[in-house]
Image: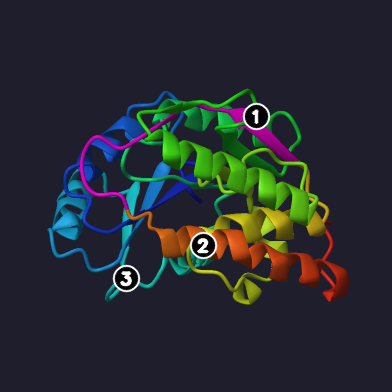
């Protein structure tokens, strides 16, 4: 039996400047969260930092090491399967670089645990544009990409590419994880779209997104292009694929 009902999955690649601070920030919260780091062979020693901290937090901190950069989507799918196997009731996605504020984790948890929602999204755009220290071009690209995805998919979600989320375990058990095809940021869109098609209740929780101060961003035009052009395939699937239904 887990001491906590919640696991935060953090994918990492070259996050030595951030990983210890983000782990300690999560563990300092009043509510107890566990953390699973999915480490993709960082040459900068990120894994060694996590392993050192595991000696300090042996019952709260876990790591899965993979060989090479295998994609954001596959990292989360690996983490989801681990979380299901270990019977966590609430499973979170969060970046290592403090663009997602750990203090918002309890708000996402509350939406699912106490307000009756199945998925909670930390949304940058549900109450305006809440982004700090991004270049204007990137803000506009992200904002209008979400508008485009919303138009094509008919999702009633303002921040369709958001990567700060909480899922109830039953959502991940219902979604056919092995059929999730996208590996980059389109993965975030596909997971929301699939949860919606399965009939789960989704809430956007307003958050402020702060651009990383340390380390290097993994975003590039090809990743973003996948998110933009992949939605046409999702829309096509929405017409013809039979999705499992929420129980």
Label 2 or label 3, whichever comes before in sequence order? 3
Q: Give residue 44's position: percent from left, percent from top.
A: 12, 59
Q: Which one is nearer the viewer's eye here, 229 or 168? A: 229
Q: Is residue 150 left or right of residue 74?
A: right
Range covered by the magenta-colored residues: 202-217
Q: Check disc 2 and report the residue beneath it.
A: 225
Label 2 or label 1, whichever comes before in sequence order? 1
Q: Is residue 120 above or below residue 228?
A: above
Badge 2 crowding class, 10 Å Cα cut-off, few under 14, some 14 to 19, many 20 or more, is: some
- Asked if marks 1 and 3 touch (Cβ < 8 Å), the reply is no
Label 1 or label 3, whichever comes before in sequence order? 3
The answer to whether residue 85 shows anywhere in this view is no
Q: Check disc 1 and report the residue beneath it.
A: 126
Q: CA distance from mark 1 to mark 3?
A: 32 Å
Q: Which one is nearer the viewer's eye here, 81 or 220? A: 220
Q: Residue at x 68, y 49 (%)?
A: 148
Q: Is residue 114 left or right of residue 135?
A: right
Q: Which one is nearer the viewer's eye here, 203 or 109? A: 203
Instruction: Assign a secondary structure to mark 1.
Output: loop
Q: CA distance from mark 2 to mark 3?
A: 19 Å
Q: Is residue 45 left or right of residue 152?
A: left
- Asked if marks 2 and 1 touch (Cβ < 8 Å), the reply is no
Q: Nearer the viewer, mark 2 or mark 3?
A: 2
Q: Give residue 226's position: percent from left, percent from top.
A: 53, 65
Q: Check disc 3 and report the residue beneath it.
A: 69
- Asked if marks 2 and 3 touch (Cβ < 8 Å), the reply is no
Q: Is residue 201 above or below residue 229?
A: above
Q: Is residue 229 left or right of residue 214?
A: right
Write down the quadrant of residue 146 in the picture: top right
């Amino acid at each position: 039996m887990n001491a906590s009902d919640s696991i935060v999955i953090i994918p990492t690649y070259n996050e030595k400047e951030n990983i210890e601070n983000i782990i300690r920030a999560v563990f300092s919260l009043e509510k107890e969260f566990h953390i699973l780091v999915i480490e993709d062979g960082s040459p900068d020693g990120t894994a060694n930092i996590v392993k050192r901290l595991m000696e300090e937090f042996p019952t709260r901190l876990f790591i899965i090491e993979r060989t090479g950069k295998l994609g954001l989507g596959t990292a989360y799918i690996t983490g989801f399967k681990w979380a299901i196997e270990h019977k966590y009731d609430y499973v979170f996605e969060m970046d290592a670089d403090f663009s997602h504020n750990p203090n918002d984790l309890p708000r996402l948890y509350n939406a699912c645990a106490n307000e009756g929602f199945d998925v909670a999204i930390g949304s940058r755009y549900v109450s305006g544009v809440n982004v700090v220290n991004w270049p204007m071009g990137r803000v506009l690209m992200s904002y209008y990409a979400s508008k485009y995805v919303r138009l094509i998919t008919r999702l009633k979600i303002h921040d369709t590419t958001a990567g700060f989320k909480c899922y109830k375990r039953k959502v991940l058990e219902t979604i056919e994880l092995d059929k999730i095809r996208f590996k980059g940021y389109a993965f975030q869109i596909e997971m929301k779209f699939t949860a919606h098609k399965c009939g789960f209740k989704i809430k956007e929780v307003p958050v402020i997104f702060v651009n990383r101060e340390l380390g290097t961003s993994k975003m590039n035009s090809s990743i973003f292009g996948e998110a933009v052009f992949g939605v046409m395939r999702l829309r096509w699937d929405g017409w013809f694929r039979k999705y499992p239904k929420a129980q």
